Image: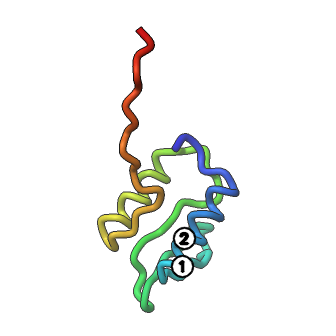
Amino acid sequence: MSDMGPSDFRRLTNAMEQAGFEIELNRSGHWQVSRDGKVVGNLPSGSGSDWRSWRNALAALKRNTGFEWRPKQPRRREHSTA
């Protein structure tokens, strides 16, 4: 995940809402993620230029709640043509 574009952000928030999370923008411009009325994490502000902040935020949500967006797919074995 190099950059989080607007469509990726929409897909992420839709998946989180379907999983039972509430997402709202707080005064500092960051997205607050809660579940059952308890804050469980934050997402970076709208800029997707720092890909590490998104990876760190998603890793924290996975640790705290088990939510995994875009789970890793098994790597396909590449066949050589030789």
Residue at 56%, 64% (x, y): give it.
12
Give the residue at mark 2. 15
**Mark sitting on residue 18:** 1
**Residue 75 sits in quarter:** top left
The amino acid on which the numbered mark 1 sits, given as a three-letter code, is: Gln
On screen, residue 51 above or below 81: below
The amino acid on which the numbered mark 2 sits, given as a three-letter code, is: Ala
Q: Secondary structure at mark 1?
A: helix
Q: Secondary structure at mark 2?
A: helix
How many marks overall? 2
Residue at 47%, 68% (x, y): give it.
42
On screen, residue 54 above or below 68: above
Mark 1: few, some, or many residues within 10 Å (few <14, many ≥20)? few
- Residue at the outermost left position: 63
Residue at 69%, 57% (x, y): give it.
7
- Residue at the outermost bottom position: 37
**Mark sitting on residue 65:** none
Decide: marks 1, 2 in contact (CB < 8 A)? yes
* Residue 5 image position (x, y, % from top left): 66, 51
**Residue 36 sits in quarter:** bottom left
- Residue at the outermost front position: 82
In front: 13, or 43? 13
* Residue 38 image position (x, y, % from top left): 40, 87
In front: 28, or 62? 62
Side (left or right) of 69 relative to 62: right
In front: 55, or 20? 20
Q: CA distance from mark 1 to mark 2?
A: 5 Å
Mark 2: few, some, or many residues within 10 Å (few <14, many ≥20)? some
In front: 79, or 58? 79
On screen, residue 2 above or below 16: above
* Residue 81 image position (x, y, % from top left): 44, 13
* Residue 11 image position (x, y, % from top left): 61, 63
